[in-house]
Image: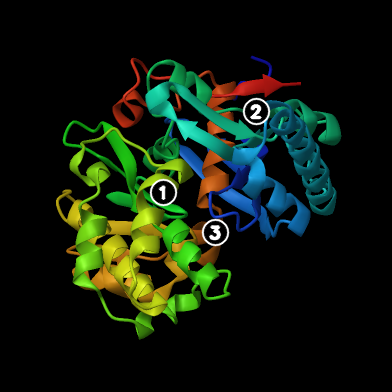
Amino acid sequence: MAFQIELGSTHTCIGLMSGTSLDGLDICLCTFHKKENGTWKYSIIKATTLPYPKVIRELLESAPRLNGEQLTELDYKYGHWLGKITKEFIQETKENPSFIASHGHTIFHNPKNGYTLQIGKGSAISTETGIPCISDFRSSDVCKSGQGAPLVPIGDKLLFSEYDICLNLGGIANLSFDNNNSKRIAYDVSPCNMMLNYLSNQAGKEYDFNGELGKQGKVCNNLLEKFNDLEYYKTDFPKSLGREWFELNVMPIINSSDIKLDDKLRTSYEHIANQITSTTNKIEGKNLLITGGGAKNMFLIDLIRQKSNKEVIIPDSQTIDFKEALIFAFLGVLFTEQQHSALATVTGARTNSISGCFYY
């Protein structure tokens, strides 16, 4: 492999991440240093979140409803846009990254039926930037009957080992931790910002800043019981969630309720905090690292703190915002090292996988 890293060397690369909440594109320029003992050290040189232009956001929102030809066109169009934006970012940094690792944007995720799709053509990114691109990180695991998600746990294990549990509050809340045999376990816990944003949009807001809308409402126990009774919470890991699951299972419950909007929001907060803490309180360990956009929602964090038996740690804003983009860059590093990044203990696949597809 042309980009294999030697012990003691440093590698500079870029991670691109687009989450289900469609907040924007996270771009992270970072370095990874492989020490003589085989452990890893990272640093973030520069990172930013670029809000999606209205036309790109609308295209991504409509993507699940497009026909095959239209979706293929969008795959290429979005890839070229990613490449152009990343090229501008690189020119501002004056760095020379070895490669770009792109998560893409998830349109379909149905591992139960053997498929997942993240668009943003890696060849288009490479063409626009003139830099190799690694993308399509989930397919190999799904082809081995895995969930294809989450993929961040290998980064949690190797880059954030000082924390007993790593929790990400994005569109979906997911966590990872080492079990008693030092095997990494991870899965999606519940919807998070996807649920809160859906209700905030009905109030004419993009999101509920610091829970200001939700905290005005009251918990509706009847609605809370319906949320908690969802079949997903009764199944054991490995398991993962996607937008399709939310639309089929959660939205009908929300839309059929005739209570006030702020009460729906307050109940959703209670549900998310309950699902997170009922899960993490059973896991051994003393601390809980929280990152992702939800880590900035102080109302949600306060609820989690009240219900948790762990020390809840909120890191610096750069780590909150760019941990996922950082780790996808790290998945690219592992690809160049020909090391496994999708863990069977996490995804339920038949074997571990070296995830990604490389475009010169």
Q: Is residue 102 visible?
A: yes
Using residue 19 as the reference point, say whether residue 268 is left or right of it.
Answer: left
Mark 1 and mark 2 residues within 8 Å of each other at the beta carbon: no
- Residue assigned mark 2: 134
Relative to the observer, which residue lies in front, 104 or 5? 104
The numbered mark at residue 321 is 3
Please state which amino acid type lies under the numbered disc 3.
Answer: Asp
Relative to the observer, which residue lies in front, 251 or 207? 251
Relative to the observer, which residue lies in front, 329 or 212? 212
Q: How many marks?
A: 3
The numbered mark at residue 272 is none
Please state which amino acid type lies under the numbered disc 1.
Answer: Phe
Q: Quadrant of the N terminus?
A: top right
Q: Quadrant of the C terminus?
A: top right
Percent x, y for residue 279?
A: 21, 52
The answer to which quarter of the image holds residue 14 is top right
Residue 336, compared with residue 278, is above or below; it is above
Mark 3 Cα-neighbour bin, 10 Å: few <14, some 14–19, many ≥20: many
Using residue 76 as the reference point, say whether residue 140 is left or right of it.
Answer: left
Percent x, y for residue 317?
A: 53, 66
Sooner in the amino-acid sequence: mark 1 or mark 2: 2
- Residue assigned mark 1: 246
What SS does tag 1 mark? helix
What SS does tag 3 mark? helix
Mark 2 Cα-neighbour bin, 10 Å: few <14, some 14–19, many ≥20: many
Q: Give the spatial CA distance, label 1 vs label 2.
A: 29 Å
Colour setting? rainbow
Sooner in the amino-acid sequence: mark 3 or mark 2: 2
